[in-house]
Image: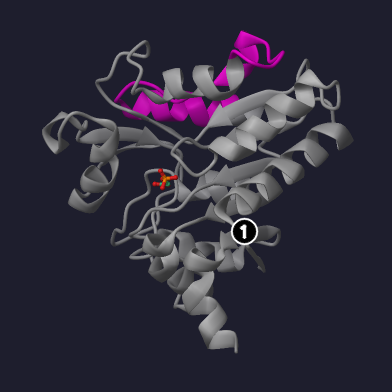
Amino acid sequence: MEFHVYESARAACEAAGVLIAAQVTRKGDSVLGLATGSTPIPAYEMLVQWYERGVIDFDRVRTFNLDEYVGIDHKNPLSYHAFMQEHLFSKVNLRPENTHLPSGHSAEAGLRYDRAIHEAGGIDIQLLGIGRNGHIGFNEPAKDFTFGTHVVTLTQDTIEANARFFKSPDDVPRQAISMGIGNIMAAKCVVLVATGADKADAVYKTLCGPITPQVPASILQLHPCCVILADHEAGALVERESR
Ligand code: PGA
């Protein structure tokens, strides 16, 4: 696993944008695995700027997002559908039929999403944030790693972390539909971005801890092409260990 530390959160996120842009440049019909949350916003800003300047072209690109809340209207500005429209889809020449987010709350909905990823040829590059508890997508700490797209019940920690976007913690949906660990591990390349001191423990356990479903991101130690991009705050415990 590659690990790079940057002077600022913005630089760490922009480095993820560089890797996605390189992927799209190398392969015009790339399949991108995309993430929501505060962390990836600067990466999307970079991609939009490069698109506007004619550096990259999304005409043949396909995208699959990691997750979506259950029971939230896609037009609700707090939905991940709306997030992606706001930060990327409405600003570049991605074809609407080529953008996908999971949706629904049944096992069939999960299977349909897995099939769509498979039929697109699999994910070339998967962008990830990380939760304070080590979650990736909405794969929360659990007894087992999950394989495919599935409905999850959010942990209290995640509800509290995401409450900042809602009026109150009571308004945060209790369930989500998320790609599984198997979907993420099947991506040809994984780019995880972690910024801020509250991610330091999760980053340390991901890189240096045992591989355990209690820290879902720790499975990435087994991924053949994974890079973790962190700012100094999120990388602090790993940097201290390697000194
Ligand atoms: P954040 O979320 O980027 O908003 O911190 C990351 C995550 O929960 O995966």
Depth order, front residue of 132/184: 132
The quarter in which the C terminus is drawn is bottom right
Name the amino acid type tagged 1.
Leu
Label tally? 1
Label 1 Cα crowd, 10 Å radius (few <14 / some 14-19 / many 20+) = many
The quarter in which the N terminus is drawn is bottom right
- Residue labelled with disc 1: 229
Kindly tell me whether mark 1's CB lies below 8 Å from ligand 1: no
Depth order, front residue of 31/229: 229
Q: What residue lies at 88% left-to-right and 37% top-to-bottom?
A: 26
Where's residue 204, x and y in %? 47, 73
Q: Is residue 241 left or right of residue 214?
A: right
Q: On the image, which quarter does residue 41 sit in?
A: top right
Relative to residue 175, is residue 158 depicted above or below?
Answer: below
Say whether residue 121 is magenta. no
Relative to residue 197, is residue 124 depicted above or below?
Answer: above
Q: On the image, which quarter does residue 172 sit in?
A: top left
Relative to residue 193, is residue 123 depicted above or below?
Answer: above
Q: What residue lies at 44% left-to-right and 73% top-to-bottom?
A: 205
Say whether residue 96 is magenta. yes
Q: Is residue 211 visible?
A: no
Depth order, front residue of 119/152: 152
Q: Is residue 40 left or right of residue 52?
A: left
Q: Which element carries disc 1, helix, strand or loop?
A: strand
Depth order, front residue of 123/136: 136
Q: Is residue 183 visible?
A: yes
Q: On the image, which quarter does residue 102 sit in?
A: top left
Magenta-highlighted residues: 90-116
Where's residue 134, x and y in %? 39, 60
Relative to residue 188, is residue 175 depicted above or below?
Answer: above
